[in-house]
Image (tube, rainbow, N blue to C red):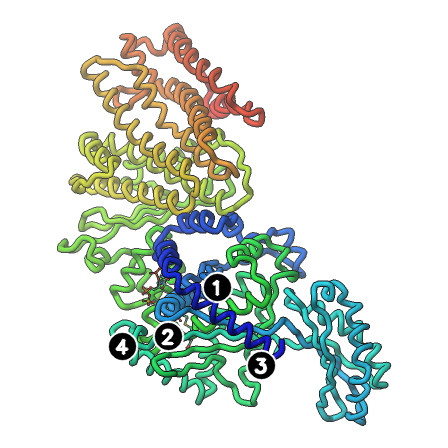
Amino acid sequence: MDNRAAQQRIGQIRQQIVQEIDDKDQKLEYAQLWAGFYKKTLQQRLDQLNKIQNVNVEHFKDGGLSLQNANLMVENCIGKIGMPLGLGLNFLINGQYYIIPMAIEEPSVIAAASAAAKTIAECGNGFETYSTRPVMMGQIQLLNVENYSKAECLIDSNKVSIINRGNQACANMVKRGGGIEDVKLRQLGEGQASVDIFINVCDSMGANIVNTVLEHLAPLVEEITGHQVGIKILTNLCLNRKVTSLFRLNIEKMSYKNYTGQQVASMILNAYKFAELDYFRAVTHNKGILNGIEAVCNATGQDGRAVNASLHGYACLNGKYKPLSKYWIEGNEFIGELTIPISVGTQGGVISQNPLYQAVLQILEYPDSQRLAEIMACVGLAQNFAALRALTVEGIQKGHMSLHAKNIAISVGVPEHQVEDAVLFMKNRGSFRKETAKEFLKAYHLFQEIGKVKGKKNQSLCTFSAQFQLEGSQEKVELHVVFDCHSNKRIDVDFLSKSEISIKLFGSKSHTWFQHLFKIINKVKIEEESESLPKKGLTVKLKVISILINLLSYNLLIIDYEKTRNYLNYVLNQQHIDFPDGEIEFKYGIALLTELLHIFEYNIQQFIGEQVLKNALLNEQNLIIKSHLNSFELWQRAKLDKEFQIGNFWLYRKKRLSCTMMLLCDCINFKTIDEKLVELMKQLGDVYEIEITLTRDTEKWKDATLKDPNIYTYWLMQHDQLLQGDRNCVLDQFKNESSAMLEMKRQRIQPLLPSSMAHLSKQATTAVSLLYQSRF
Ligand code: HMG
């Protein structure tokens, strides 16, 4: 681009910025849409992105790259590695707002870039950017050069034929408007020279095409110069592919955390000067810039090593390593600028090998390579500005460490739903160390310190842990729950331990029984459609938590019916109720139940997108507990008042088997989830629940007492035949009545099931016949 054309483009950009920024509504609308995005759940963020940008967010959940493609991409492949992907927000670039995907393992980078971009949009007009065309330079090494002038003259006079020959190797690039633009010889001394080939690589990063052209040209260069050719390779220092990002801030408006705009501006200038004067500092200053740039490289499938090499090369171009950004004051404006040589592409490379990159480019509104480079420069500059502002105003650790605290908590095994509490704990302690996170986990004196139960003394948190290697599932499920059971005594229960309290709360056979129950109901699963491992993990986890809730609420009703009923009625209606008093085991059970309900809901809200399934799962969980309450009540009325409602007792009793819940959890893996599917699963679950309850309660009847609810016992009581229950004719009568109801439900559902699921209505029969020696 000649000087006049460049000036014209700069003028256009400025005009565009002023025009678009004048549109105050745009800023307002953007702020309303994205403010507080980080406070939303992961699922809410994905939903918002999907809704606003119409992006297929599925790829973001599993990293997009298939194992097969990974295996084709590198040698000795053994898998893939994950990295968090987030959104840099508030970037107003040349008058247009951008949402910028950033992939990075380091906490606080995305927050910092977004925070700085917000200041830059609000206290100025956002970023202005300028860039040169995507011209890369390749080098052909010439050896044994004796006469440089002659060699230079030969290259120069044969320029046209070199260009023509080279363009044959990149004919498609030429068609797109690219190709070789210039050829020059540079003297290096000691008999060596570099024939520099300048190639417009359009929207590619350029490495492949440049190297292809160089290898194609080498024999011609050898022929023209008569000198031996050495290596042929592009240079990553792409001085002809530069980009500049610049912002201007009204100094008055730059105030930050109790410091005036003047103070902030002057402190940042001092910090910048430090980097100018000292190359130790300059390296770290530039690392901050790369935090932002590399995160966008990772998210868009760029060769980050090439970018890094180029930036560091440029930083010491004049023999001394310098900061890449510049800051200065002009009148009442504070100005930041970053100019860097950067080679990135939006076509070719690994972009086509992973659909995730396409989705990321869609979020960026499919930029060309020049625009992508401009975006990266803005993120680098924002990141640098944020770091300098934080360093000068409050020190880097405050913001950085409070965000890093999440990683620390996760690394010591704090369960995900309690990470926020652990971070708060560490913040309050002013210590972001593993030891502190472990203390949280052990729950020593935590609640007094974070103020949740202010005023109470000597309370400590209780813990519950469980590990299941479930039969019929390859997943290992681990649960670690920390909770307050409103007692001075701390209790730690391991589900496997067969301790007294565990037996009381989960039943006498505890772990074996759990495995047994899980085995039955796991047989009534529907095969998943999705291969997404994270979803499979979630399915099993939700199933396990739900069964634990089921067992616990049932046993708590046996331990103290009145108090449990009272408490659960309030909790299920989301009303406040004081924590019930009682024996420590009871209090432990109630507190654990409350926490498990919380974990169950947390996982659903965070990780399940479809509202219809979310509602169905949460409603079903409530229904299971309400059914326990109702079946206990009907049981008491039958026992004490001889008042019978067999239809309703069936309705509530069968819920103990959780089959509908298991089927709904399986739905998580379905690609399409709608009301029809959910309704079908409910009907199918109903059939399973009736069949298994029928088998189970008649099998168990041998030992049945009036203590535990049982459908056969209930029917016998109603027919005044309690003592005749083991007679075949009585059992047959019960069987006939119940089977008729079951058959009717089965007939109703059969035509609704798609052919691929036709076998499902009989699946429960197979499952129970494997586990019980059926009496029917
Ligand atoms: P703050 O100003 O307190 O943030 O900064 P705020 O609460 O006022 O929020 C402002 C905006 O920031 C929010 O807008 C968000 O966009 C974003 P809103 O949504 O409210 O409209 N934001 C967040 N985004 C996601 N998650 C969050 C979050 N919080 C705010 N949790 C901040 C807080 C941490 C950003 C600030 O302290 C900061 O900029 N710290 C610098 C952190 C940093 O640079 N980290 C990089 C790692 S350190 C390093 O490697 C580089 C270094 O060595 C380089 C050098 O030496 O130069 C430092």
Circle 4 Cα neighbour tier, 10 Å, few/some/many (<14 / 14–19 / ≥20): some
Crowding around mark 2 (Cα neighbors within 10 Å: few <14, some 14 to 19, many 20+) is many
Looking at the rendering, in which quadrant would you find the N terminus? bottom right
The amino acid at mark 2 is: Leu
Contact between marks 1 and 3 (CB within 8 A): the answer is: no
Residue 21 point in image, percent of width and height? 41, 65
Alpha-carbon span between mark 3 and mark 2 = 30 Å
Are the residues at dot 1 and dot 4 in contact (C-beta closer than 8 Å)? no
User: Above or below — where is 27 with respect to 665?
Assistant: below
Ligand 1: does it lie within 8 Å of the C-beta at label 2? no
Q: How far, Cα to Cα, is label 4 from label 3?
A: 37 Å
Q: CA distance from mark 1 to mark 4?
A: 32 Å
Instruction: Label 2, secondary structure: give it.
Output: strand
Q: How many marks?
A: 4
From the viewer's perspective, is the residue at label 4 or at label 3 nearer?
Answer: 4
Q: Amino acid at mark 1?
A: Ile
Between discs 1 and 3, the one toward the N terminus? 1
Disc 3 residue type? Answer: Gly
As measured in the structure, the alpha-carbon distance from the residue carrying label 2 to the one carrying label 4 is 13 Å
Name of the residue lying farthest toward the left? 455
Q: Is residue 144 visible to us here?
A: no
Nearer to us: label 1 or label 4: 4
Q: CA distance from mark 1 to mark 3?
A: 23 Å
Residue wearing tag 1: 104
- Mark 4: amino acid: Thr
Mark 2, residue position: 249
Q: Nearer the viewer, residue 605 or 532?
A: 605
Label ID, residue 611: none
Residue in the image at 34% along x and 42% along y: 601
Q: Is residue 48 above or below residue 768?
A: below
Of the pair 600 and 515, the residue shown nearer to us: 600
Residue occupied by mark 3: 313
